[in-house]
Amino acid sequence: MSQKIIPVIMAGGKGTRLWPLSRSSAPKQFIQVAGDRTLFQATLLRVADKSLYEAPVVITNQDFRFLVAEQARDIGVALSGILLEPVARNTAPAIAAACAYLVEGFGEDAVLQLLASDHEIDAGDLYLDAIRIARDTAISGKIVTFGIRPTEPATGYGYIEQGDILPTGARELRRFVEKPPLAKAEEMLAAGGFSWNSGIFMCRVGLLMNELRAFAPVVLEAAVAAVAKAHRDLDFVRLDPESFAASPDISIDYAVMEKTSNAAVVPAAFAWSDLGSWDAVWKLGAKDEAGNVVLGNATLVNAENSLIVSRAGHLAVQGVKDLAVIASEDAVYVGRLEDSQDVGKLVKRLAAEVHTAKLTETHPTSYRPWGGLTALLDGDRFQVNRLFVLPGKRLSLQRHHHRAEHWVCVKGVAEVTIGDQMRLIRENESIFIPQGEVHRLHNPGKIPLEMVEVQTGAYLGQDDIIRLEDDYGREKA
């Protein structure tokens, strides 16, 4: 049997390029852009073939740890480990930490594949052929990247110039080209021999550590120390904060790939997108006869070449062309598709204003280790939420100083503890939790529990949760 590959999935980014669906607390890798899986789940399923891959390692941050664990569990994918970055330090320190972690369990000769968690890829035969060529090339002693065959002179991607063919079918990597202006991109496509830089890499663990030692020794030293001093917390490995923070903030491209003489590229023809803009989502979507892509409930009249997405009510769109119209539960974005690369500038402006900053940070639906909640209505001295609790999960034992709560069971059976009393609440039944009373909600059943929660009181902030016991190691909030 050929050597298996260890996938290392980078899932810590907090980008908001697909705002208003993506937020800093719910970035695009963890949301359903199209279809019934998140981009992170789709990435996990691409590396689920046990004849080709070992169980993956995921690198993320503290805020997303339960999202990672729950989304992997939801699709039945086991993980080799979940590494938690204590601070953001770009890709090189994260990858170095993954190498230090893997070398302990798999050895220096292990082959790893580095993947982003938020790319859209057609994982058919062309993809699998490229993976096998890359594995053989990595085993031969190269750091391999995947070069995507360009379909247009895109200016939002970096490029790779290919060199001579290698015995494995890969090619020498001559140089990287930064994101070019349009004229330069057109020139490269006309010349041939250039690929888009996919950001996917494959190599032996020991080789990458040696290259880091040669070109970015401070990065490697910090990562090795962070892993050596790490501690386990439930299913997570918490990297040592002080050690990890000592690393420079640098990408793997700058730290290693642009300096190494051991790089190769696999030219690949599989469909790929980093889904970095609404324009990219439109290009990949199934279009109607007028060139529109519609995701969600909408009615279109005289609309052409537009992207219409609704996660809230019904959108009625008339007389538009080349637009993106994106409606989340609490915000709507309207802009030209050709300008969608610049959504980040709009998000920065929203984040700078007190009354709109929340729209860039939190999503109406937020996830917890026990399930999650959706904010339905926020009024003066009251708030209405939908709670969903996974089978067998329970919230922390807690109390609130400033609010009372009314819970109505709409699906499943709830086990509710109030003080020293426990009651079972079934569908269409309700219960009241007085202000200051110790309480807990538990789903003892085999189906998800749904509750409508009405909070009333002078202060309804999340920091009025005093946790007395918690199954997930969370601190008091």
Image (cartoon, rainbow, N blue to C red):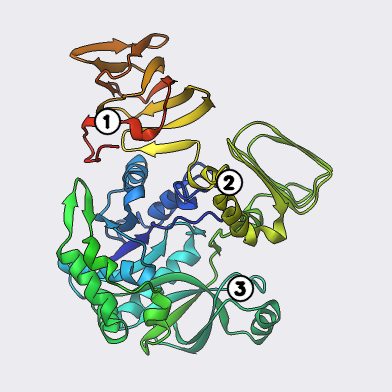
Left or right position of 175 against 349: left
In depth, the one of 142 and 91 nearer the eye is 91
Disc on the earlier residue, 1 or 2: 2
Q: Amino acid at mark 1?
A: Ile
Instruction: Tell me what residue is drawn at x 30 percent, y 37 percent.
Output: 477
Left or right position of 41 against 184: left
**Marking on residue 20:** 2
> To which residue does mark 1 refer?
466
Spatial separation of the CA atoms under disc 2 and disc 3: 29 Å
Left or right position of 408 against 274: left
Dot 2: few (<14), some (14–19), or many (≥20) neighbours within 10 Å?
many
Spatial separation of the CA atoms under disc 3 and disc 1: 54 Å
Instruction: Tell me what residue is drawn at x 56 percent, y 58 percent.
Output: 275
Spatial separation of the CA atoms under disc 1 and disc 2: 31 Å
Q: Quadrant of the N terminus?
A: bottom left
Q: Is residue 404 visible?
A: yes
Element type at marker 3? Answer: loop
> To which residue does mark 3 refer?
150
Residue 298 placed where, x, y %?
70, 36
Identify whether 27 is placed above or below 295. below
In depth, the one of 317 and 383 nearer the eye is 383
3 or 1: mark nearer the eye: 1
Disc on the earlier residue, 3 or 1: 3
Tell me whether the residue at label 2 lies in contact with that at label 3, contact meaning CB atoms closer than 8 angstroms. Answer: no
1 or 2: mark nearer the eye: 1
